[in-house]
Image (cartoon, rainbow, N blue to C red):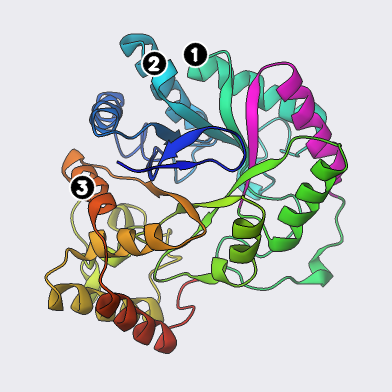
Amino acid sequence: MRYRPLGRTGLRVSAICLGTMTWGRQNTEDEGHEQMDYALDSGVNFFDAAEMYPTPYQEDLHGRTEEIIGNWFAARGTRDQVVLATKAVGPGRLFKNVRGGPRLSKEQLEAAVDASLKRLRTDTIDLYQLHWPERPANYFGRLGFDFAEDRRSWTPLEETLSALDDLVQAGKIRHVGVSNETAWGTMRYLQLAEQGKGPRIASIQNPYSLLNRSFEAGLSEVAIREDCGLLAYAPLAAGMLTGKYLGGAKPEGARLTLYPQVSRYRKPQGEQATAAYVELARKHGLDPAQMCIAFVLSRPFTTAAIIGATQVAQLRNNIAAERLTLSEEVLGEIEEIHEVYTYPCP
């Protein structure tokens, strides 16, 4: 397993990060524990969670994934072997039950961190991330910023970063990151940190896959020049890039079969692009999932690829992608497909 610097924190994290968002809904607690056991034994030292997990979101399951992780720490005594990341939920119609409507304010972030620490059964969180901005920015499948929507009030970034600084000083969190963030938002946080107004952003957790390479436009330069690397979520585009959904297939127990409302990647252009990438992988004798993950890991702006799985066999296959180096021929043919299907599923 390769390990890479997490920004300028001094921490080194595995190139594969274990995603956890299915635990407590699609996976049982025992299955979650089995995945953590396997990942740790395979050299994965980086786990990513969120207060809202599992997904799709369900009010009565809020925080259940963090509880499963906390129970594993207590049972195994492995807390000191893991770089633990979690996230504070942003505003949204599904989350009105959370603290009366979540904001990224001082009061709310303090409450969110305290609740996560209790569920995770730990004294500190290594990387605390803002799951998405309060601003109506271009995230969750939307490209571009519609200024006309930016009318409601949102917590100033100065207040948010100051609140995170207080939590660092209190020892409740060690480092901070952003998620589903824009180039403007990331640079503004970095600027505020340079002015001494809070901790420096260590990472950007955004979607990145062969079906969504929008990170490359703007944020890739920020990630490289500012040592603020990408934690790539959905590197397999919710499983689409494995090819298992091609031709309208609905595999039993698969995520998009169980939750058809999770349709961000199941679009006609996405299906066509997926078919092309799967054909390319098979032409070169590669596993499609491993090829797609290896591509994400090959980018100079990537710190880690976040791998989620519902079965240990899937996890085993996906972790093995870390050892795969794609040839220049394969990389060149990927670019040829990308020219045809540039942003099929933003």
Measure the C-alpha gap from mark 3 to mark 1. 28 Å
User: Residue 44 location, x and y as percent?
Assistant: 33, 35
Q: Amino acid at mark 2?
A: Phe
Q: Amino acid at mark 1?
A: Arg
What residue is drawn where x is 60% and y is 34%? Answer: 9
Picture disc at residue 73: 2
Q: Residue furthest left?
A: 285
| Camera-nearest residue between 113 and 52 | 113
Say left or right for 287 vs 149.
left
Disc 1 + disc 2, Cβ < 8 Å: yes
Q: Which residue is mark 3?
A: 314
Picture disc at residue 121: 1
First in sequence, mark 1 or 2: give its number: 2
Q: Is residue 215 above or below residue 334?
A: above
> What element does badge 2 sit on?
helix
Q: Is residue 194 above or below residue 298?
A: above
Image quarter for residue 22? Answer: top left
> What element does badge 3 sit on?
helix
